[in-house]
Amino acid sequence: MAAITADIVPAPIAVPRSPGFWSGVLHRLCRDPVALAALAVLIVIVAIAILAPYIAPYDPTKGSVIRRLKPIGTEGYFLGTDELGRDMLSRLIYGARLSLIMGVVPVPIAFVIGSIIGIVAGYAGGLTNTLIMRTVDVFYAFPSVLLAVALSGALGSGLTNALVSLTVVFIPQIARVAESVTTQIRSLDYVDAARASGAPAFTIIRVHVLGNVLGPIFVFATSLISVSMILASGLSFLGLGVRPPDAEWGLMLNTLRTAIYNNPAVAALPGVMIFVTSICFNLFSDGLRQAMDVKS
Amino acid sequence: MNEEQTVIDIRDLSVTFHRGRKPVKAVNGVSLSVEAGEVVALLGESGSGKSVTMRSLLRLHPKGTDVTGSMTVSGRDVMGLSTRELGQLRGATVSMVFQEPRLALDPVYTIGQQIEETIMRHEKVSRQAASERALALFQKVRIPSPERRLKNYPHEMSGGMLQRSMIAMALACNPKVLLADEPTTALDATVQIQILLLIRELQKEYGLSVIFVTHDIGVAAEVADRIAVMYAGRIVEEGRVGDIIRDPKHPYTKGLLGARVELAHGRDRLVTIPGSPPDLAAMPPGCAFAPRCGQASDICLRDVPPLKPIGETGNIACIQYA
Amino acid sequence: MRTVAETTIPELPLGERGGPAQPLISARGLIKHFPVKGSGFLQPKKVVRAVDGVDFDILKGETLGVVGESGCGKSTTARLLMQLIIPDQGDILFDGETVGGALPLAQYRRQVQMVFQDSYASLNPRLTIEESIAFAPRVHGVPQAKAIARAHDLLHRVGLEPVRFAGRYPHELSGGQRQRVNIARALALEPRLVILDEAVSALDKSVEAQVLNLLLDLKRDFGLTYLFISHDLNVVRFMCDRVMVMYLGKVAEVGTREAIYENTKHPYSAALLASMPKMDPAERTEEPPLSGDPPNPIDPPSGCRFHTRCSMAEGVCSATPPPLAVVSSEQRAACLMSVPGSGHSHAPKPAAELMEA
């Protein structure tokens, strides 16, 4: 009992720590078969993209006029050939590289910038909030496709410009989520308790706000990856993203559209890849959101 | 006890939730009967299973919940009802009043519309007739300027007015049974007493059988004819309200009544029950209260004491009275 | 039992300045109006008169209870005292010094801490218990190891064994345990005043009794002063030395516990007391002491704000706002029946008239 330890100066004792928040998330995620399956498919796609030179049977840019638009299942060309006689399987494998870059790269950049904007606006509140968020709303008011196309068009076509314009498209969306989550957290008693203890705003944001808002923003950002892929495909489709002859799913969809009546199955293949990848990102982010709910 | 008069009869009810890693046995063999025109308070702390027991009567539990035992409400076997029959039971024979009327009412319809809908869902009457009845109900629960109030949306009303509206809606189809789930807990004391008096008055007038779930002994003493005290999913003591309050038998009931601050005048500390209720996912083998009980013996830690009659009207689950 | 002295952290000095007779805290003319969202467009701007001219003292070492219905301004008063919101008007004096003036805000905040009603929302779900308690001392420059040691000490003090609880997260604790953690956190800066805003209201009765006992022990051991806000008049009677009754942003009555509970001079206090459930089924309440809900603080009634619900109200009550009149050395009431010559038929005769008669 307490009396025994009366005159012992309390040394910091080794305290068994409960498993942290993220290990709990991992535990719950491991029990979600759908999210795990989606993650597995994503890992396979990423692996294919990385290992493309080793597994693609042909050069994705080399075509031949005599074997144009071969159907799926042709001897030697398992997934057929495109309108320039290039091997579809090889192009899909190489296309994963650019498509993933276009889908994945803008999101983390927008995540960092958008989170900073949103958290500052949400924590500051009042006039600062109004000024920042109304500016953000101006960008948000344009449909994201239109904004991406306009920005890409203004910057000129090419991979880097497409990435920049996609990033700009996502910043307001992420900032809005960050702002609303931060505003919510800010009204909670533990933030008031921290303010009452005299902690400066930066410390409160670092210790009490960041840890609790980054999760929800992160989940929202993951769901944007699929949007980014689709937008990127759209840009390439319009000739504003990747330039031919590079393989990218959206661009392939664009160039194959002429073959849609002759060989619809082959023409649809890049679309199938975009669909599968984006839905896997969506399912995974959905699973992540559920796993981050402490009460479940 | 007259068998014909029993309106609610619960026999050996157990409810197990499967949400987390371990199944949680929220209700563990509860038997309770309520007669016509009787008010029974289910008294207990959070996690005692009082709300779960009451909600079982309308089968309001999420899918995947194990419910065993038998329940009859005015002669109908609740466990055997089809979804359709259940819909008729809810709202018509049995209606419910919740702790948070704001969450129980639809924010996009006026209170009047919602009461009319409730009436028309259960009875073949015109909207005109339904709206006349809604007005009469609003007068019954004494809402000032009822015509105007019927046209209000839930957010335009104060907590006390909303709870009155909920009661009006609950009475819309002349139910036999009213289930009240902590209906006054979120209200101010001055409003709470008004609602308690209203429930008491309407209960007498309509001859309702009421199950009133509460954590507050004072509230139970104001409304109930009988009190059933629940602890960790079981009824530990049950009896007439005066007997329970003046002469509690079970050590837990004694502890609850002894811990009241009203009794502490001139004393500098309150008498408390040590410890905290058991984890429902890992219940001790014997009496659930034994770990906190000053009079517990080895038997208490080993066997669950059955609920046995004591005196003329009471029941108790304690080895001391077996 | 460990004593406080052993764990006192030199970095956090306690300062007794004004002497024992000086009230620890004095609120002078506090006013806080909140603008109503969405109003003010093509119409006059509406305000919620949450706190509308409140004066009170909390004496050193006492517990002042604040009671009243929802919307009476008791929580806003707490947040004003805590400087979480800034008053529109009025001053707070701490031990004789104006907060934000002679006494810098940072120094004030060390000495006043608060425990909130919602035990879950007041703990950061991502921090362990010890991290939450050690946060405030860390902010004030106490080294990590020392802050953690103090956190363990406080956990022990509030009845939670550090070995079992320090490394846990809030969701792994029960409501009562979390509220103990919140109390420990409030004590981490060695404050002199602790504001308890409905701190036990969400707890089960048997747990509430344990926490109330703990609060009494801590008050004695640490020499604390409490502002105890609650809607439960029984709890306030048990805990408090003096009681302040609030109604719609104003003080209705203030006095010693005995004066308020046994000899109230305000019809509102009387109604509040009569609204408590009787613990005797043989003598149940037959008539509600008050009808209707408390009026909206956006548009409070004229004159005495209680006159719309008061059974003693007369014509004069809707015209004249009552001052907080001195009833006795230990009691003040804002009711015209206590103001000599106010024109209310129950008011005492003014001294001049008595002389003439």
Image (cartoon, coloured by chain):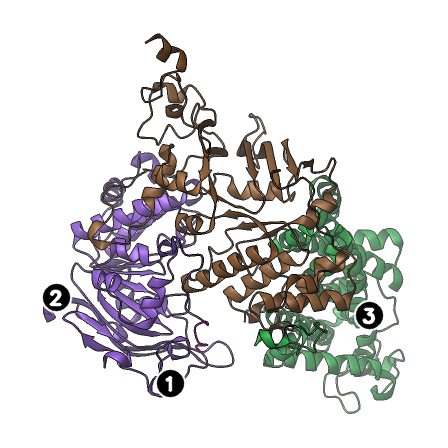
Chain colours: A green, B purple, C brown
CA gap, disc 3 to disc 2?
74 Å
Q: Quadrant of residue A277?
A: bottom right
The residue at which mark 2 appears reads as: B5
Residue at the location (41% across, 69% down)? B273
Task: Please tell me whether the stretch drawn in magenta is mainly helix, strand or loop.
Answer: loop
- Vertical placement of A121 versus A55: above or below? above
- Quadrant containing the N terminus of chain B is bottom left
- Vertical placement of B186 versus A247: above or below? above
Q: Are marks 3 and 2 on the same chain?
A: no
Question: Given the image, what chain letter belongs to the residue carrying mark 1?
Answer: B
Circle nearer the viewer, 2 or 1: 1
Residue type, mark 1 in image: Leu
Image coordinates for residue A290, horizontal then vertical, percent: 59, 70
Q: Residue furthest top?
A: C356
The residue at which mark 3 appears reads as: A101
Does dot 2 land on a helix, a strand or a loop?
Answer: helix
Q: Quadrant of residue B132?
A: top left
- Can you tell which mark lies on residue B1? none
Image coordinates for residue B263, horizontal then vertical, percent: 35, 56
The residue at which mark 1 appears reads as: B301
Does dot 3 land on a helix, a strand or a loop?
Answer: helix
Q: Is residue B64 left or right of residue B229?
A: right
Report crowding for label 3: few under 14, some 14 to 19, many 20 or more residues within 10 A (C-alpha): some
Image coordinates for residue A120, horizontal then vertical, percent: 75, 50
Q: Quadrant of residue B46?
A: bottom left
Q: Is residue A95 visible?
A: yes
Q: Are marks 2 and 1 on the same chain?
A: yes
Residue type, mark 3 in image: Ile
Mark 2 or 1, nearer chain start: 2
Question: Given the image, what chain letter belongs to the residue carrying mark 3?
Answer: A
